[in-house]
Image: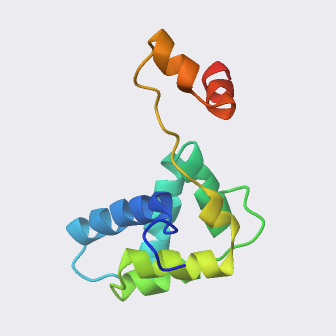
Amino acid sequence: MNSPSSLNLLCVGFLGRLYNSLVIRHTELSPELVEEGLIRACAEATGKENRLCYYLGASSDAAAKVTGEVSRPLSAHVPVRKICQRLQRRDGQICELRYEHPVLDWSRDALSKMRVLELKRVLA
């Protein structure tokens, strides 16, 4: 679970951007302030980041609310990687979220070497 390959880059990237934006704007971070910032960031999130917000309970349509698992450690300046590791232990679905890999080369050779699942994503 602690290997870099198993660490979810989507979680680390999203929470890292949130933390950096909060630290720039505010000198002291409280759990309420972080939770408010998380809800604001999730309102603007799209795609996989929106799905992460759903799992955290920060989106409007979320069933469970576990934003405290993020807001308390972030307000105490716990590293984002540690927070994501704790979240992954709590909810395995967070581990499954990944950024979509953009298709850069549209040449015929590149398309013939793509996997079927990647081709389906391109066509969808």
Residue 101 against residue 85 in the figure, above or below: above
| Residue 57 quadrant | bottom right
x, y percent for residue 20 = 28, 65
Q: Nearer the viewer, residue 65 or 98?
A: 98
Residue located at (46% from left, 32% from top): 102
Q: Quadrant of the N terminus?
A: bottom right
x, y percent for residue 91 = 68, 74
Residue 57 can be seen in this image = no
Find the residue positioned furthest to the top: 108
How many discs appear? 0
Residue located at (42% from left, 70% from top): 4
Residue 118 against residue 13 in the figure, above or below: above
x, y percent for residue 13 = 40, 59
Q: Quadrant of the C terminus?
A: top right
Q: Nearer the viewer, residue 100 or 75?
A: 100
Residue 92 can be seen in this image = yes
